[in-house]
Amino acid sequence: MKVKAQSKWVRIGARKARIVIDLIRGKMAAAALAELKFMPQKGARVIEKVLKSAMANAKNNFKLDEGVLYVSEAYVDEATPFRRFRAAARGRVAPRKRRQSHVTVCVSSRERKG
C-alpha cells in the first residue's frame, strides 16, 4: 500500500530540493528521517516535515507499523515562480524569478525478513 504526503508552494528551488530528496529515495523511512535531521540544507527541513507527515498518515489512517515503512517514491516538481523585477542600468528592469516547489513523498510497507 502506498501512502502519500505532499507540500505545495514551498519557497525553495526544485534543483536544490532534488539534491536532498535523491539521498533518501528507497531507504527505510526511519533511517531517512535520521539522515535528514543532520543535513545542513534548507531542503532537508522541508522534506523531513513531509516525510513525517507521510509516516503519520500511514500509521493513523492505514494502521501500518512505522518500522516497516520505506520511501517508495519521492520527487520535487517546479511550481509557478513569483515574477519580480529589479532596477537595472539606464532606466531598465531586470526580471527575477523567485522559484517555488511542490514536494511529494510516498511511503510503502515492506515486510521484515526473519
Image (tube, rainbow, N blue to C red):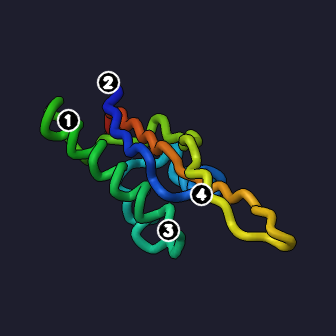
- Drawn side of residue 109 relative to residue 63, left or right: right
Disc 1: which residue? 64
Residue visible at 33% across and 56% down? 49
Q: Distance between the residues labelled 4 and 3?
A: 16 Å
Mark 1 vs 3, N-terminal side = 3
Write down the quadrant of residue 65 in the picture.
top left
User: Which of pointers 1 and 4 lies earlier in the amino acid sequence?
Assistant: 1
Q: Mark 3 points at which residue?
A: 42
- Percent position of residue 2, x then y: 35, 27
- In the rendered structure, which disc, 3 or 2, sits on the residue that comes first in sequence? 2
Q: Quadrant of the N terminus?
A: top left
Residue drawn where x is 68% and y is 59% of the image: 96
Q: Nearer the viewer, mark 4 or mark 3?
A: 4
Front residue of this view, candidates 31 and 61:
61
Three-letter amino acid code of the residue under disc 4: Arg
Q: In this view, does 26 lie above or below 96?
A: above
Q: Is mark 4 on a helix, strand or loop?
A: strand
- Spatial CA distance of label 1 from label 3 is 29 Å
Coordinates of residue 56 in the picture (x, y in percent): 21, 45
